[in-house]
Every structure is written in C-alpha cells, then in structure tokens.
Amino acid sequence: MINFSHYLPTRFVFGRGVEDQTGEQVRALGATKVLIHYGGGSAVRSGLIARVEASLDAAGVKHVSLGGAQPNPRDTKVYEGIDLIRREKVDFVLAVGGGSAIDSAKAMAHGALYDGDFWDFFCGKAKPEKSLPKGVVLTMSAAGSESSDSCVITQESTKTKRGLNTELNRPLLAIMDPELTMTLPPYQIACGATDILAHIMERYFTNEPDCDLTDRLCEGTMQAVIRAARIMVKDPHDYDAAAQLMWGSTIAHNDTLSVGRVKDFASHQIEHELSALYDCAHGAGLAVVFPGWLRFMLQKPDKVMRLAQFAVRVCGCQMDFEHPEKTAQAGIDTYVAWLKGIGMPVTFGELGAREEDIPYLAAKVKRPNPDGTVGKFYALGTEDIEKIYRLCL
C-alpha cells in the first residue's frame, strides 16, 4: 500500500424518512439561508421539495430555489445559480437530486466565492481556494457525488465535459433515504448501478501490489451492487436492494475503497466525450466503454492476471491456470451479460454513437498525465483511445 491521507467531512443521515431532518441538520451546520437546487419536475410533483422546504421552515432557515439541473450538468445553469447565490446572499447550497444536481451545486458553491469565471477550475486555469458549505438530499444511487471530491460539468457551447477533483467538493451533509430512489424508471436504476460498479472498477484495476484489504472491500462491494441491481430493476420497491445500492454508490466514490492504491479513471475520461457529444446517460456510456477498455487490456500480457482475478473473485468464473487469458475473457463476457441483463447498451450503435466520430472523440479526451496520456493501469495515447472506441463497435 502507498501512503495516503483520507478525510471525510460528510455526515451521513441514512434511512426511511430522514429527509424530514434536513432543516435541523442544515441549521446545525450554521446555515441561515439556503439555495435548494434540484432537477426536473419529479422532485416537485412527488412532494419532496415541499417536505424539504417545510423542514427548513420549521428549523427557521430561509431558502430560495433553483430547478432545472440536467443530466450531464451544464455551465449555463451553474452561472444562473452563482448569480442567485450572490443576489440572495445565500450561505449554504443544498442539492436535492442525483449526481447532476449535486455537481451543479458544487460548481455554484465554488463560483460564488470566486472573482473570475468558475470554468477556470475545470479547464485548469485556476484551483478553488474556498467554497460555500454544501449538503445533499439524495434521490438517485449512481455518481457518489454526495461525499466525493469529484465534480463534472459540461461547457454547453463547446460540448466539452471536464471534471474537477478537490477536497472542497465534499458535501458536509448527505441525507440518504433509499425510498426516494424507488420512483426511478428501471433504465435510470440500471444506469446508476453501472456507474457505481465502474467507480469501483476504476480503483480495482491498479498496478499497486500488496493491497489485498482494499481488493477484498472492492470485490465484496461489487458483488453486492451486482446482486442489488438485478433485484431493483425488476422490483424498484425492494427496500433492501435500494439501500444496498444507495450506500454502495457512496462508498464507491468517496475513496473508502481506494486508499493505499493508484486509481485509473481512463474509462471515465473516454466516456465523458460520448455523453458530451451525444448527451447520453453517463452510466449508459460507461456500459459501452468499460467492456472495450477491458478487451484492450486483455491484449496486454502483464494485465491478464488482474483481469482474471476480477473474473474469479467478482464474476464467479473458474480459474484456468494454464490459460488465464481465457479466464479473463470469461470475466468480461460475464460482466457484459450483467449489463445486458439490466438493460444497458453495450455497443456504439445501441448508444447512438457513430464510428466516423471516433477520431474527434479520441482527440478531445482529457489527458491528465504529464506525458499527455490518460490512465494509470496502462497509460493511453490517442491511438490507444481510438482502439478502445473501436472495440466498442
């Protein structure tokens, strides 16, 4: 294990009906005026926004609201929120929704205290030094943004999707009622589960030796997510499955499972270009990209044993010690079968992506490594990224 520093400032309030505690929890954090940021009309129609507002009123906390968060959250909505925060003198930002609302809220909280353009943080021109405190009432198990250091925003005019990692992204409060996820359509549940599993896989596929403890934590969490997703896409009202997915989404992306090891995250960067160009669901894009990434890695002899371990420990395949590459392939096949079984697309065509766009997509992928590559398990250049996209056809 490598050295690490791990700090989680988030208070988790988990269980049935806990959204009614929002007001007292927010007030305890010193909030006097809250911006409630949410997505579409479902949060209003279900009565959730009204319950959150009533809880804030009961706690004596003032509030203003801003709806309209979209999947693949846009910079245009962030600018709108920044203006509202400043105009109303808001001192706490509360996202009600899934990853899109949460990421928008994070960006608003940073931008409201910054003299320049908040996009500077996402294009690498500046780093946030301060941010408003943030909280979440979670309604979708997927992104894990309720306690992660991550935030992803799309610049609408250029269709550029970029992420920002900073400890300032971590919310101070996560209100988590699994029942709030039960109104989601099966496709959205499946997209969320795919994203959760991908977050763990981005950590699991590492070159770091001697990290058996977090290997086992990752493997157990992946198996629980796989089982819960199968149940919940068929029965969205199964509380235990909903609870497993909700907590799984949280620990998948707040670094609980990744301490002491090097993360990859190339597949996420490769997918970002799909959802930026085609506006597909992030989880659906990952369902297409990750199998392609695994097939690419199977061609690298020094990566085969790691893929075979995933196949045996997570997918339940039998180890072929004479031909570990066959075991690794069986694991990929089992993973793809799970994706199909929960209703995910697994090819470019099913996603609506076009082969002729591959050079454009590959050229736009963010390359955070100093040598202009992306990924830590295997550093990918433009030619490699194009090969991965073609393995998704």
Image (cartoon, rainbow, N blue to C red):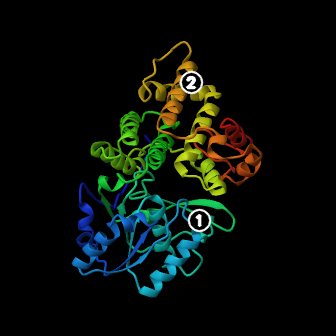
Q: Quadrant of residue 377?
A: top right
Q: Position of residue 313 (x, y in %)?
A: 42, 27
- Quadrant in which the N terminus appears: top left
The numbered disc on residue 227 is none
Q: Which residue is mark 2?
A: 329
Q: Is residue 118 left or right of residue 3?
A: right
Q: Residue at horizontal 46%, vertical 44%?
A: 190
Q: Nearer the viewer, residue 105 or 53?
A: 53
Crowding at dot 1, Cα within 10 Å, few <14 / some 14-19 / many 20+, comes out as many
Q: CB under 8 Å between callouts 2 and 1?
A: no
Q: Position of residue 142 (x, y in %)?
A: 44, 51
Mark nearer the viewer, 2 or 1 = 2
Measure the alpha-carbon separation of dots 2 and 1.
37 Å
Up-down relation of residue 154 to residue 313 (above or below): below
Q: Residue at horizontal 58%, vertical 43%?
A: 376
Q: Secondary structure at mark 2?
A: helix
